[in-house]
Amino acid sequence: MTQQFQNGHIYVDSGFAPHPEKGDKNSDGVYRQTSQLDASIQEAREKLTHRTDARPEFEYELLYLFAQNSIKASIILPVIATIVALASLSWTPANYIAIWLGALFFSTLALIYLCNSLIKMPRKKVKVHIWRKKIMIAELLHGISWGAIALFGLTSGDHRAHMFVFVTLSIVNSLRMMLANAALSIVYVGTLPIILALFFSFWYQNTPFYWAMASMALGTYIFFIYLMSYLHSNTLTTLMLRSEKDALIAELEQSHSVSEEGRRRAEAANLAKSRFLATMSHELRTPLNAIIGFSEMMKDEMLGGHNVSAYKGYSEDIHNSGKHLLNLINEILDITRIEAGKYDLNEEAISLPQVLEECCYLVKMRADAKRIMLRQNYQNDLERLWADERAIRQIALNLLSNAIKFTPTGGTITITAGHTSDRGQYLSIKDNGPGIPQDELPRVLTSFGQGSLAHENAEGGTGLGLPIVKGLIKLHDGRFDLKTKMREGTEVIAMFPKSRVLQVMPQIQPELADNFDQKIKTKQKAKILQDKNRPAPQNLTERETLCIETTPAV
């Protein structure tokens, strides 16, 4: 199974078509959703990879935040303007105040209208640079309107009016700079007319007091600029973190979609594999059994001798090849059932030493052909093991076959069975062969994996022996352990838990058994006597009364 990356999508290649068939609504929906997620991820990555200080990737978000804050302040500033207008009537003519208030309300309404239109317009249709210019013009008019009150207030000789104008414009400036810090350029355009009008109005009074007031107004404005820049940086940081979060969520959703598609394809592939194996099991094993059977008849010359003696050798080759192919098919089916979790155990009480002795007898001819000694060492009084005898036999035969295959001529194989430290049981098969390199251990434990020694010695095999052994041990809740050292040999240990060891009940002592039987007989006799002394029921027939009286004593 491989993975392919095409057009931004990951496809799991399991031997089938990598693209969904036309009309597959589920797959089409998954790919449409994946395409949308790809677009979101690409947009977020473009924002996060931008390196300039201007941050144009967040221009829309900053302008949108400015519009939101301006709408929120749309109630506060008109209220302040109304209070200022009423208070200014004491030193400014009413017609001037009316003109100023009308201009201020008009500029405020224009700014709110533009901000509201920006918020309602879909993002894709917003041209940020055009909308920024529109809002700048409205903000400039709004700032000029507020700055005009400084000219009206300072024409009066009343110092209280001057202080009132100073405090009012300072409050308005601070509110604008705090609420609209998301767009610095727009805030500068809106607040500079106010502070300039206030500064020059105080400066041209030509008194030290008003010069100090002008300096204080300018210093306050510089301080608020510094504070506004800090808030602007925090806003940018918040937007960046939110963008990272959105990108992460989009990637997680994309991974989930890809994994769901991969799971669906894996299930389809698994179903196809199961059908193929079922077909192979029937279509291959049935004719193969016939080949093996008839070749055995020809090999043994059951129906008569061959006219050509070479035919007998050919028949034996056909028979051996058929058995090898049948064994290969059985191993493939076994490992498939184990991996799919469909290998059913037929558990019963078995003797581990007895199974190992039978397996050693089956492989003895192969061991004798290489003059290999099979040394058996079984612990006495091993309890029976609750396991599948066929599976335990297959474990032992696979390990013995591997040991014989890789043990040199004249070597020794040690077969051991005994108790583990936690009172479980284990079987161990150890050879004195060349061993397995440490870097090849993961390969030999995978399906169809073979070490370099198998290729060098040209030994036959499928590489399924150890994976099958490991899977069968796992089905018995056991543990598989492989120990190897170069030029010293390999030892494979299969350990079974204590829960699978059948405990033998202690034998009852003869004296206790005799006393127990005597007590039972005494109770039976007492019950019989009690039944005989009981008065007979009334309204019984003569035959029923006779049956009760003649009931023999036990």
Image (tube, rainbow, N blue to C red):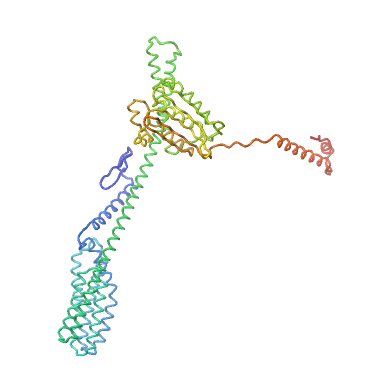
- Image location (x, y in percent) of residue 11: 30, 44
Residue 256 in the image: x percent, y percent?
35, 50
Image quarter of residue 517: top right
241 in relation to 371, above or below: below
In the image, 104 versus 418, the foreground residue is: 418
Q: In this view, does 245 lie above or below 314?
A: below
Give the position of the N terminus as an image quadrant. top left
Above or below, comparing residue 16 to residue 44 in the picture: above
- Counting from the top left corner in percent of width and height, residue 408 is at 39, 24
Snapshot quadrant of residue 112: bottom left
Q: Choose top left, top right, bottom left or bottom right for residue 467.
A: top left
Q: How many marks?
A: 0
Residue 463 x, y percent position in the rendering? 38, 31
Q: Is 549 placed left or right of 469 in the picture?
A: right
Look at the image and tell me in which quarter the C terminus lies.
top right
| Farthest-out residue, top | 307
In this orientation, which residue lies closer to the viewer: 389 or 31?
A: 389
In the displayed structure image, the side of residue 520 where residue 183 appears, left or right: left
Is residue 404 toward the left or the right of residue 36 in the image?
right
> On screen, 55 above or below 224?
above
Q: Residue at x 18, y 68 (%)?
A: 133
